[in-house]
Amino acid sequence: MSNDISEALGGDFDAESIPIPSYEPIPPGWYAAEIDKAEVRDTKAGTGKYLKLELVVLDEAHEGRRVFTQINLSNPNQQAVEIGQRELAALARACGVPALRDSAELLQKQIRVKVKIKTEEGREPDNVVVGYRPLSDAAPAAPKPAAAKPKPAAAPSAAGKRPWER
């Protein structure tokens, strides 16, 4: 035996001392995150471009976990472009960059992202980013219960008087 790993590491490697990260999706919700990578790429078909983002979750329970998203910038499908424009506008506003010119302007920006779990047949569940807010915005409160409908006023009695009129 050559002990090449021990020599390379300067000692024995103890696998039990190293935590193994979870690759399960994080629960749906709003999370503080920092944009770690942002780059414009060509689509597979070569007919458009998209912005690829890698974000690092900052919230303590899932700190360090990464979520990924893509935003269509140009595409032969006009609806895809319109959706991409709305997503890019929400991202730029959340980052405080209203006139976004370069993907590098997004790097290290801390924002809130809304994460959901996407499930597709034949694939493992995965996180998907579906919303952006400035970091200063608190996570949205749970919806308020609907107000009780008021009861209709009592109809006049046969004598033409209301029940409280005697």
Image (cartoon, rainbow, N blue to C red):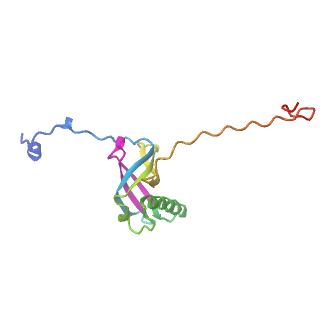
Q: Is residue 151 left or right of residue 84?
A: right
Question: Is residue 150 visible in this depiction of the protein?
Answer: yes
Query: Where, by quadrant of the figure, is residue 45 drawn?
Result: bottom left
Tally of numbered tags: 0
Magenta stretch bounds = 50-71
Quarter occupied by residue 47 = bottom left
Please, what is the dominant secondary structure of the magenta stretch?
strand
Give the residue displayed 41% in from the left and 45% down from the top: 126
Q: Position of residue 73 (x, y in %)?
A: 46, 64
In reply to whether residue 114 is colored magenta, the answer given is: no
The residue depicted at 37 percent of the width and 45 percent of the height is 59
Q: Say which quadrant the N terminus sits in.
A: top left
Residue 56 lies within the magenta run:
yes
Given residues 14 and 161, the one toward you in this image is 161
Q: How far across and how far down the image is residue 79, in percent?
A: 54, 61
Q: Position of residue 11 (x, y in %)?
A: 9, 41
